[in-house]
Image (tube, rainbow, N blue to C red):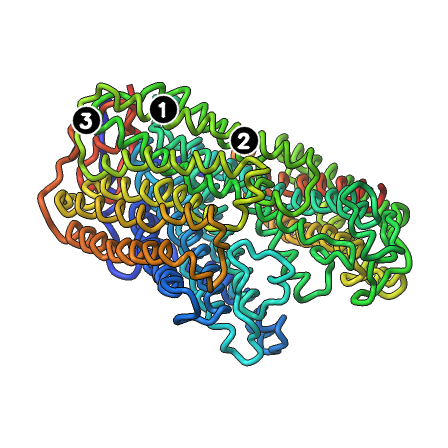
Amino acid sequence: MSTTSDHYYVPEPSRWPIIGASGVFIILFGLILWMNGVNAGMWITALGMVWIAYLFKGWFGEVISENLSGDYNEQVDRSFRQGMFWFITSEVFFFLTFFGCLYYLRNITLPYLGGEGYLGASHMLWENFTYSWPPLSLPDGSGYVEAKHAMGPGGIPLINTIILLSSGATLTWAHWGLKKESNRQLVLGLLFTVILGVSFFILQAYEYGHAYTEMNLRLDSGIYGSTFYMLTGFHGLHVTIGTIMLIVMLGRAMKKHFTVHNHFAFEGVAWYWHFVDVVWIALYIFVYWL
Amino acid sequence: MTTAVAHDDHHHGAPSGIKRWLFSTNHKDIGTMYLIFALVMLFLGGGAAMLIRAELYMPGLQILDPDTYNNMVTNHALIMVFGVVMPAAAGMANWMIPMMIGAPDMALPRLNNLSFWLLPFGAAMLIISMFAPYFPGGGTAVNTGWTLYPPLSIQAGMGMDFTIFTIHILGISSILASINIVTTIVNMRAPGMSWFKLPLFVWAWLLTGLLLIMVMPVLAGGVTMLLFDRHFGTAFFDAAGGGDPVLFQHLFWFFGHPEVYVLLLPSIGILGMVVPTFSRKPLFAYKPLVYSMMCLTALGMVVWAHHQYTVGMSQTVTTYFMIGTILISIPVGYMLFSFIFTMWRGSMSFETPMLFAVAIVLMFSFAGVTGVMLAVVPADLQYHDTYFVVAHFHYALIPGALFGIYAGTFYWLPKWTGHMYNERLGKIFFWWTTISFNMTFFVQHFSGLAGMPRRIVDYSPIYMEFNVISSIGAFAFGLSHLLFLYIIIQTVRGGKKAGDKPWDGAQVGTPGLEWTLSSPPPFHSFETPPLVK
């Protein structure tokens, strides 16, 4: 970074935002067609994905080159940091929604369906239903594929917990490397983190396959399958996004983009990764374990 | 307060043509686009309302079939909430907040443009949803009302998917806009612009932004689950599979109740600017007013289930939500008294913005009173799903949100355009809307108490007189907006030149730096941060 601007950097008109908005529209439009049995929808969605990938490359490329040419002063850096902070806050609430649902279903809905409490009127509807978590047999399983087993806390989920926790550690180690200006430690730390992220992804995919084929635990296995896949699925999506961001950071670290005083992108990704980590711990406790 | 508006040489004036509008990174241009978008949607949502009132003019089926009627009810609400009030408030935030706090622009200008451009695409999706029943295999129209309760929303046709994704797009837009606004307020204040020098409008938007960041993702999660229940066989809202339709209601209202404050708070902020100006007196008890807004924000997050008293929650739960809801009248009452005491012994004059402000204090109190009535569980069991509720929330949202936006429009139009609007026409517009609004909705209290159910296309002939009055009022209310449009176009195109400070009381109280700029302000303002003493 050469010189720091004394003005707050206000970018020139940019074509990226409208490309982004249209990309979101194309993806969702395609998805609707696809979900309603129009196969062309798949191709429209794919087109939208390419459009969005082009957007990310272009928009972030522009930001990176502006940053490298020293357009951003400290105040701009603070804006990015605060923006990322509030973005992660909104993500926290997104996940809280699903955890809240799990809590509600386990503590209110299902006990009522099982006939507990003075409002347990459903006992008149499904008299044979007794509640226990996980509910492998449903009040009325006719529209659903009932699961054979529940997911336990041992095995792959435990390994995945260890993987994600250690990836948090390697990422922090990379951050220390950045702070003491050791590019080698930064790159190595990021590389380990990426490898751990990818292994998590592979194991999770294997686990899903196992659950679908052998345990009969599916998205349409009633409320247990629904909450299981919703929570772990959205977490997996975030791991995927986080891993892609980490790979970009690895590339930028290899190009020596980061300095001790200017590395918001790295920190933003690190925050995001730690957030994904914390969500997993909550998942492990509430979905797999308890 | 002194300012130095230095003009930088590497920034030139406004870029020209299509680039200026499609690719904008300027908070004033983006604010203008937000406001134009909101105005266009106002006529669309208003059109839906006119159809509803035309249908209800007489008992029996007149012009709409029941499905289309319910679709109009749904889209009237969705358009007015997500397409009119929120974008208009965001447009004003875009225009005014950087100028008030002495910032060169919004903190993240490109993100700002993304938040705007998501809106037209979301609106396109919403409009497609209305036509989905005519597609091959399109199924029934979106006939659930804006609350999208399952199981009806799971049975609805393809249009529901478009509605769900509309909510996703508009939700992303408002989360991004809120992130930007909150970051701007926290990070971009000019040196010396300390927290308790901030104009009330800025405070109001800070809290609105925080609310949106917290509750919008919950709605997004809720409608995502709805989508999965519709297409991928999940059982979230199906009791047979172990789920619960009431769960959706909790998710919806966890968003939906704070949303009321999202719509209300920016208008409270505008009142905080308008009332001191035309009373020529500082805002009464500014700090406690800010605290009461915080209190409202916090309480607003934890009272959502008062929308669901009749679904069979336990008595403990309904009692908690009842008490929480009634508590909200304390901060709201505080705000209204604060405005009344600002007017007290002020040297008041009644230009159009002030007329709207006085009307808001009066008519919003009315909604507050019916709100307390509805908050009481045993009473609500009678009022639930009647026109009493319709009257209540239209008294809350039209004065509480829309009139605030009108007040802001008339208050800031001279600053935005550099021209004074036609005061006489403004006053005519005020009286026309206020009288016709009351004519439309006041009688609905009576038809509601008499038991007329809402969201039903037909009604018993005993309610006819009320509905005729209401419909005539609604047509007049709708028509008045053509005058609104005319005043705005007239002001944009010309008129008496407005000074930098078109209102002589504008510097009283806690204004920001907006009046130190010229009218209209330069394309880039405050490139060098001004020092606020």
**B191 or B92, nearer to the observer:** B92
Can you tell which mark lies on residue B348?
Answer: 3
Can you tell which mark lies on residue B279?
Answer: none
- Residue B44 visible in the displayed image: no
Please tell me how crowded label 3 is: few (under 14), some (14-19), or many (20+) other residues with Cα within 10 Å.
Answer: some
Alpha-carbon distance for marks 1 and 2? 19 Å
Please tell me how crowded label 1 is: few (under 14), some (14-19), or many (20+) other residues with Cα within 10 Å.
Answer: some
Q: Amino acid at mark 1?
A: Phe
Residue bearing mark 1: B337
Residue B73, percent from left and from top: 46, 60
**In which chain is the residue bearing label 1?**
B
- The quarter of the picture where residue A95 lies is top right
Taking the spot 83% from the left edge, 63% from the top edge, the residue there is A141
- The quarter of the picture where residue B309 lies is top right
Along the polypeptide, which appears first: circle 3 or circle 2?
2
Residue bearing mark 2: B299
- The quarter of the picture where residue A76 lies is top left
Q: Amino acid at mark 2?
A: Leu
Along the polypeptide, which appears first: circle 1 or circle 2?
2
Residue B15, percent from left and from top: 26, 54
Asked if labels 2 and 3 touch by Cβ distance under 8 angstroms, the answer is no
- Residue B504 visible in the displayed image: yes
Along the polypeptide, which appears first: circle 1 or circle 3?
1
Q: Look at the numbered disc 3 and give the secondary structure of its residue.
A: loop
Left or right, B532 with reference to A75: left
Looking at the image, residue A156 lies above or below residue B232: above
Asked if labels 2 and 1 touch by Cβ distance under 8 angstroms, the answer is no
